[in-house]
Amino acid sequence: MSESHPPADRQTLAASLRDYVDQIREEGLDGLPVGETKDVPPAPEPSPSMAVAAPASPPRPSAPPAMGEMFSKYPGLEACGSLEHLREFIGDCRRCKLWPMRTNLVFGVGNPKAELMFVGEAPGADEDLRGEPFVGRAGQLLTDIIERGMGLPRAEVYICNVIKCRPPGNRNPEPDEVSSCEPFLFRQIETVHPRVIVGLGTFAVQALLKVKTPISRLRGNWHELRGIRMMPTFHPAYLLRNPADKRLVWQDIQLVMKELGMSIPKRGG
Ligand code: SF4
């Protein structure tokens, strides 16, 4: 008798494994444990001391492709001088394989002259339906961080994602999709030209900085992205699963507030 799994089972197994790997990556591990699992120590929980300690070895310097090289992928992109113009340029985009699966292209929202910009990974189901980034449960948590934590109206900041269309099943965007879509993100960044960017979660931060360093080593430290200060922190969706780490995000946000010259309330998060 054959023991092979039907295709649907294999797909489910593959999806579960992918979710597991995504989660441990978000939590700062580089790969799966090998060998007898009973001898493998439990994954370390991020602690407050990790927030302030220097990483064992500094993350590699960011080396994104030159802007001209990236923009030359789409002639005319560099000439987009406003967010409205850029949105028109993107149009009913079919430049990568995600377009047939989207309900709405999720461009970005907020103040076009914002001093603070949040960049996440890609739209989820709620965002795809509404055409707006960060509107589901994770979005509400981001709004709380901005409004209750920082004391800013959400409309005062700018919020967008690396990828503008929802990957099926909320899987991680694939390299060809990032390569197709990221010129739009970098044009958005150049157009808004914020003083500070907060990168939300492993994928967004690694895509922005072009590194493979885990988020737990990147967060809490300043990075530079084309002359703009950038603070990586955990994604709000991760915080929904790991609420104890909200305090680490609050520490990162306080560094951002300090950089922007904002007064920090005694209690927050
Ligand atoms: S993800 Fe980006 S490149 Fe792909 S279809 Fe959507 S807007 Fe176009």
Image: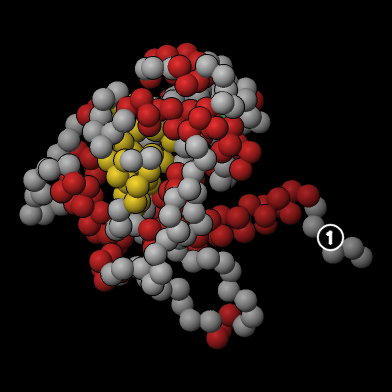
Q: Residue at x 42, y 14 (%)?
A: 85
Who is closer to the viewer here, 233 or 60?
60
One can see residue 197 in this view: no
Who is closer to the viewer here, 20 or 218?
218
Residue 186 image position (x, y, % from top left): 44, 32
What secondary structure is marked by label 1?
loop
* Ligand 1 within 8 Å, label 1 CB: no
Residue 93 image position (x, y, % from top left): 57, 20
Residue 145 image position (x, y, % from top left): 24, 44
Q: Quadrant of residue 60?
A: bottom left
Q: Residue at x 34, y 57 (%)?
A: 219
Residue furthest out toward the right: 1
Q: Residues within 10 Å of mark 1 (few under 14, many from 20)?
A: few
Who is closer to the viewer here, 193 or 131?
193
Residue 151 image position (x, y, % from top left): 14, 39
Q: Is residue 30 above or below residue 168?
A: below
One can see residue 191 in this view: yes
Q: How many marks?
A: 1
- Residue type highlighted by circle 1: Ser
Quarter holding the N terminus is bottom right
User: Which residue corresponds to mark 1?
Assistant: 4
Q: Residue at x 58, y 69 (%)?
A: 32
Q: Is residue 252 left or right of residue 237?
A: left
Q: Is residue 85 above or below residue 134?
A: above
Q: Is residue 21 above or below residue 153?
A: below
Q: Quadrant of residue 44?
A: bottom left
Q: Quadrant of residue 5?
A: bottom right
Q: Residue at x 15, y 52 (%)?
A: 268
